[in-house]
Amino acid sequence: MSNIEQTLSIIKPDAVERNLIDEIKKIFTDNKLIVKESKKIHITKDEAAEFYKVHQSKPFYNDLCLYLSSGPIVVMVLEGENAVAANRKLMGATNPKEAEENTIRNLFGLSIDKNSVHGSDSLENAKKEINFFFNN
Ligand code: CMP
């Protein structure tokens, strides 16, 4: 039985800065994830803090919010079969040093902070995160 889902993907400042937008989008489309929505934006630190609220008790929260607001990002809605898990598999582990070969973070990630992409970790969070950026 098919299970078509939507998930949120963010191309982070380090990857936008290195002109990796098209290359990363191609990885999604080559792997049967459709880019349904896409926009390049530059968010404020307060908006980043709201987006990453689930991490507010973590020691890295402030740096994380500063980083996501440090330059343009691309936010996308990806759609496809089991899109949440499919996107996470394509991204690889959070720390690029631990990411499987040929995953996006293995190919492009620079550090645990500058790890090139974000992806929703559950269907429930995907809905919240999509709504956060595309609530028109
Ligand atoms: P992301 O998937 O965007 O979700 C939260 C981000 O926090 C994560 O990617 C990392 O870039 C960043 N981060 C920084 N330090 C850590 C850490 N120790 N553990 C997990 N995430 C971290």
Image (cartoon, rainbow, N blue to C red):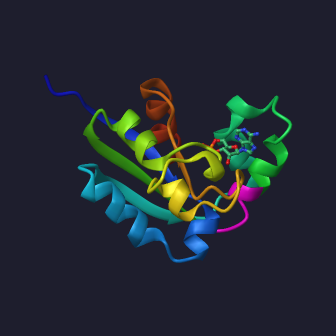
Residue at left offset 45%, top offset 62%: 39
Residue at left offset 35%, top offset 55%: 37
Quarter of the image for the N terminus: give it.
Answer: top left
In the rendered image of this protein, does residue 1 appear above or below residue 80? above
The residue segment tinted magenta is 67-71
Identify which residue, 116 or 51, lies in the foreground: 116
Place of residue 16 in the rendered image (x, y in percent of width and height, measured from the top left): 56, 70
In the rendered image of this protein, does residue 66 appear above or below residue 78? below
Place of residue 132 in the rendered image (x, y in percent of width and height, measured from the top left): 53, 41
**Residue 72 appears in the picture as rendered:** no
Q: Is residue 45 left or right of residue 86?
A: right
Identify which residue, 100 or 89, lies in the foreground: 100
Place of residue 68 in the rendered image (x, y in percent of width and height, measured from the top left): 68, 56
**Residue 110 appears in the picture as rendered:** yes
Identify which residue, 51 or 98, lies in the foreground: 98
Q: Is residue 3 left or right of residue 91?
A: left
Residue at left offset 55%, top offset 64%: 108
In the rendered image of this protein, does residue 88 appear above or below residue 17? above
Kindly report the secondary structure that dominates the magenta region of the rendered protein.
loop
Q: Quadrant of ligand 1?
A: top right
Place of residue 10 in the rendered image (x, y in percent of width and height, measured from the top left): 52, 53
